[in-house]
């Protein structure tokens, strides 16, 4: 999200949330590959798998309702081919 983003940052500011990011468009390919490699080394795939649940598209609406009700911890991956 650049400085010209049409989104409002007011909800983030009101909640005291900082928006951090990197404009990687201008980074060289070698630098981006090094960053992805470093992330792959630091990220524990087992922990990521523990907080991820794969669901079908038919399960997406009930999953969204559970999210809105605050009953979900982790992330959903929607497999549209399932």
Image: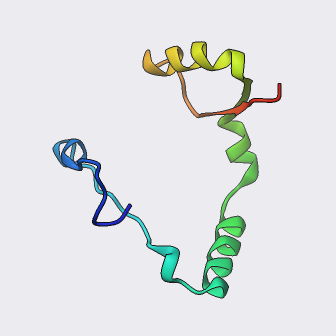
Q: Quadrant of the rendered structure where residue 14 is?
A: top left
Name the quarter where the C terminus is drawn.
top right
Q: In the picture shown, does residue 31 fall above or below 11?
A: below
Furthest-right residue in this view: 82
The front one of 42 and 61 is 61
The front one of 40 and 54 is 54
Q: In the picture shown, does residue 43 fall above or below 74?
A: below
- Indicate the position of residue 75 as horizontal and vertical percent values: 60, 35
**Residue at 74% across / 52% down in the picture?**
45
Q: In the picture shown, does residue 29 fall above or below 69?
A: below
Q: Quadrant of the rendered structure where residue 37 is?
A: bottom right
Name the quarter where the N terminus is drawn.
bottom left
| In the image: residue 23, left or right of residue 11 | right
**Residue at 35% across / 65% down in the picture?**
2
| In the image: residue 16, left or right of residue 61 | left
Q: In the picture shown, does residue 68 fall above or below 49?
A: above
- Indicate the position of residue 21 as horizontal and vertical percent values: 41, 65
**Residue at 69% across / 46% down in the picture?**
47
- Indicate the position of residue 17 as horizontal and vertical percent values: 27, 50
Coloring scheme of the render? rainbow
**Residue at 23% across / 50% down in the picture?**
9
């Amino acid at each position: 999200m650049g400085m010209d983003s049409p989104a409002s940052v007011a909800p983030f500011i009101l909640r005291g949330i900082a928006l951090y990011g990197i404009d990687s468009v201008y980074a060289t390919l070698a630098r981006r590959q090094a960053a992805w490699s470093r992330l792959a080394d630091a990220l524990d795939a087992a922990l990521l798998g523990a907080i991820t649940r794969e669901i079908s598209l038919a399960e997406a609406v009930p999953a969204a309702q559970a999210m809105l009700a605050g009953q979900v911890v982790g992330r959903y991956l929607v497999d549209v081919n399932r």
